[in-house]
Structures are given as structure tokens and as C-alpha cells.
Amino acid sequence: MPGRSINKAMLRTLWINMMTISSSTIRIDEQEIFFEAGQTIMDAAMAANIYIPHLCHYPGLPPSGNCRLCVVGIGNRSVAACITPACAGQEIRNNTAELNEVRKVVTQMLFIEGNHICPTCEKTGNCKLQAIAYFLGMLHDHFPQFYPHRELDASHPHILLDRSRCILCDLCVRASREIDRKNVFAIAGRGIQAHLIVNSPSGKLVDSTIKVTDVATTICPVGAILIKEQGYQTPIGQRIYDQRTIRETAQQEYVSAKAKNDAD
Ligand code: SF4
Ligand code: FES
């Protein structure tokens, strides 16, 4: 207000505002962003349009912390951004050469652990693992291939499950439980023995309650769960990651999930 001096009440209001701002912000790569109570670093980053590479995180689903691609640095610690709460004053490193190199090694390990032969996989161009590899500049697998032989379930008339491509991200498990309300999938075993199982009397998809329209059927980031006879409906060259980067599609997923959440 022109001509009016700042009085004590105004100073107090200003101080409270400043304290509120500093107590609800974090910095990611020098950029200060707000967060809300209960948000993870990933949540706050996505709300501020900052991309932290991820595979097992999906907006609107509870995090699992499985893939470790979202590794970020805080001081001398490395943490998974999708399961680490945002706390006031955190100084976070994200888009650094060192962290992207760690992410690239994680991606290489995911590639060799399963049968991710992109030129022969019908998910090519729509696959998040492949898109992350491009994003991180991965040019080769580096490690020896495992070439695993895991059970393929082609029992369902419309849905295929190829466990040799499963990266155990747990997304289908969470989507089936949290969105479809069915619990069709679970992960059994630990470490190298961990594998995806189907909750049905025979252990086969055909005897489960899964439907083509379930979110669990379409959320798989790789070519492990596929809808039959649709693989080549979209020609190669016109697929998701032929047109947009994984960074752009991640933001689109966040915006859609937020719009849905706001509407509910
Ligand atoms: S089948 Fe797909 S969605 Fe399910 S755990 Fe494996 S990679 Fe993830
Ligand atoms: S996205 Fe955080 S561990 Fe997978």
C-alpha cells in the first residue's frame, strides 16, 4: 500500500508466511519445490514436473520400492524417491551423471535377467524398460544374459503371461488389488526364486477372474502381460515411445491420475 509503513502485525504475517514456505519445501537439483504432508519425494517431484526415472511407480497406486530406478542422493545417502517421504529442507540430487549411471546399470541388470529381446517382442515401442534404456543412453547389456526359462501361461483366450519377461515390478499385483479389487496376481518366493503367481485353483490365468478390461491386464510396463491378437495393431514407428519420451509419458500419467483423483 503506497505511503503506508510496515507495522508489527504485517511483519508477523510476513514471517509466518516465510516460515510456512521454508517448512514445506525441498530442493531437487537446486530447484525449490513445495510438498504436501504425506507426499514422497517422487510425489512432490511429479507435481512440480520434475522427472525422476521410475518403472515400478505408478501415480495413484501405493509405492513398492521394487525397481530402484528412482534412486536419488541426499547428503551421502542414496534412497528410493518413491518410498522416501519428503521432509522440509531436503537437498536432493536427481539428474546427475553419477545417478544416471547407477540407473543405467540397474536397467542393464533388468535386461539380462529376463528375455528382453526387443526386436522380437511385440511390446517394442510401447515398453517402459526399453524407453528407460533409450532415455539413459544404454547401448548394450554389458552383463552376460541369463536367458531364463520361466513358465509361459497362454491358457486364457485373450491374455498371455510370459514370465520370462517379468521384471517383478509388482504393478499388476497392486493394480489388481487396489483398482480391480480382485487379487489375481502375487509375487511368491524371494531373491532369485521370486516369481509371479496367479491366484486361481490351477494357477492358470484361464481359471482366474481376470478380464481384458482390468487395469492389471494393461499396466505391465514390459511385454510380460499382453492382450492376444493386438500386438501389431499399432505399427512400429507409431507406438508410444516412438512419439514421446518416457519423461513426457510419465508426466501425462501423473496428470491423468490427478484429474481422476480430483474428480472422484
Ligand atoms: S507381469 Fe508385468 S506388471 Fe506384473 S510384475 Fe511382471 S513386469 Fe510387473
Ligand atoms: S520407482 Fe522407486 S523403486 Fe521403482
Image (cartoon, grey):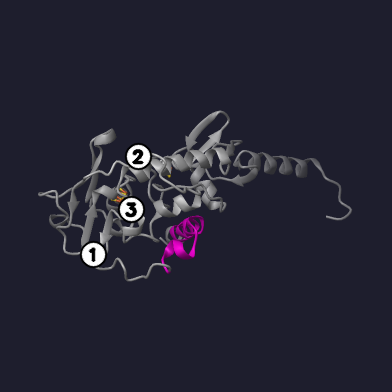
Instruction: Between residue 155 and residue 13, name the one nearer to us.
Output: 155
Q: Identify the residue shown where x is 16% and y is 60%.
A: 156
> What residue type is disc 2 on?
Pro
The reply to whether residue 86 is visible in this rendering is no
Which residue has dot 2 on it? 144
Q: Label 1 vs label 3: CA separation?
A: 19 Å
In contact (CB < 8 Å): disc 1 and disc 3: no
Which residue has dot 3 on it? 117
The relative height of residue 117 versus residue 112 in the rendered view (above or below) is below
Q: Residues within 10 Å of mark 2 (few under 14, many from 20)?
A: few
Q: Identify the residue shown where x is 24% and y is 68%.
A: 229
Numbered disc in front, either 2 or 1: 2
Numbered disc in front, either 1 or 3: 3
Farthest right residue in view = 3
Q: Quadrant of the N terminus?
A: bottom right
Looking at the rendered structure, the secondary structure element under dot 2 is loop
Q: Identify the residue shown where x is 72% and y is 43%.
A: 13
Residue 35: image x %, image y %?
56, 45
Which residue has dot 1 on it? 228
Q: Label 2 vs label 1: CA separation?
A: 31 Å
Magenta portion: prevailing SS class? helix
Q: Is residue 96 left or right of residue 239?
A: right
> What residue type is disc 3 on?
Ile
Looking at the rendered structure, the secondary structure element under dot 3 is loop
1 or 3: tag closer to the N-terminus: 3
Residue 250 painted magenta: yes
> Ligand 1 near label 1 (Cβ, under 8 Å)?
no
The quarter holding residue 9 reads top right
> What residue type is disc 1 on?
Lys
Q: Label 3 vs label 2: CA separation?
A: 14 Å
